[in-house]
Amino acid sequence: MDFGLKDRTALVCGAGGGLGGAIARALAAEGARIAVADLDGEAAGRTAAAIAAAGGRAMALAWDLGDLTAIGPNVARIEAGFGPVAILVNNTGGPPPTPVAGQDPALWSKHFQAMVMSVIALTDRVLPGMRAAGWGRIITSTSSGVVAPIANLGLSNALRLSLVGWSKTLAREVGRDGVTANIVLPGRIATPRITFLDEQKAKREGRSVEEVERESTAAIPIGRYGDPREYADVVAFLASTRASYVTGSVIRIDGGLIPSI
């Protein structure tokens, strides 16, 4: 199946990590030019190098998404090197595990800026080019907590849910311009972030990490954690020309974990 992504420019945020890196490689395998953005410049460089080694084209950008002043210069650099961004994958890091009650307003503000405002501002920067071209894909990775809130991830549950409302509204505004906007949310995908959360839960509850992992796996109908490549393949489809009639959706990639309909 040809996804129609050859020579299109994709910006993948958080692409130095597990999910973002897998998404960047999947899009590159379909012929897209990849701008690899990550707070960790060395990690971004490793993803870009892996893409290049596989015959793809990539540039690495050390990018703090919470710094809104960096959006203009970084997008301009991508445009100069690869052309206008046709595919934007919004993928931010998560806040620390905490209850939702009693958190410092400054903590809420910090993570709202990094996780929500950054996504909105970045999308607003690249959207005019997509509309002018009559084609674009905006894919925002969130968390299963937007469907079924996750205990002790209060900030994440609340802040990421705001992106669902934003994406749905955006989809209605830009659909006639050939631009789609969708949300993807992971279940238990085997990434460093999930390892960190399992370790924190084990420490908090006085259990072993192995016990926490066994408990988590038992709740997944498929019976295992997901592979980042499985997540990335769904994102690549949503970015493709084949997904032109999918917009305003929330796509679960969770092995059946989320119990709600």
Image: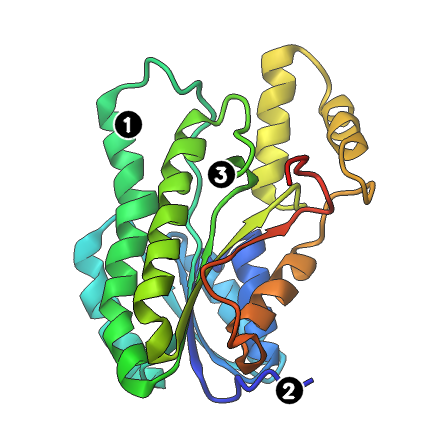
- The residue that mark 2 highlights is 2
Q: Check the picture and name the quadrant holding the N terminus.
A: bottom right
In front of the other: 17 or 247: 247
Give me the C-alpha separation between circle 2 and circle 1. Answer: 44 Å
- Which mark's residue is nearer the viewer, 3 or 2? 3
Disc 2 residue crowd, few under 14, some 14–19, many 20+, Cα 10 Å: few
- For this orientation, the residue located farthest to the top is 206
Q: Which residue is mark 1?
A: 107
Of labels 2 and 1, earlier in sequence is 2
In-image side of 159 versus 231 (left or right): left
Closer to the N terminus: mark 3 or mark 2? Answer: 2
**What is the x, y in percent for residue 223?**
83, 40
Label 3 crowd bin: few (<14), some (14–19), many (20+), radius 10 Å: some
Q: Mark 1 or mark 3, which has the lower sequence index? A: 1
**Amino acid identity at mark 1:** Leu
Give the residue at x 33% y 13%.
102
**Does 248 appear above or below 115?**
below
Name the residue tied to disc 3. 146
Q: Please tell me which residue is depicted at 79% across the width and 28% down the height of the picture.
A: 214
Indicate left or right for 228 with 249 as reference. Answer: right
On residue 71, which mark appears?
none
Label 2 amino acid?
Asp
> Distance between the Cα atoms at labels 3 and 2?
32 Å
**Residue 99: percent from the left, percent from the top?**
44, 18
Question: How far across and how far down the image is residue 65, in percent?
Answer: 30, 52
Q: Is residue 7 above or below residue 213?
A: below
The structure residue drawn at horizontal position 26% and vertical position 19%, both measured from the top left corner, is: 104
Q: Is residue 62 visible?
A: no
Q: Nearer the viewer, residue 198 or 150?
A: 150
**Residue 260 visible here:** yes
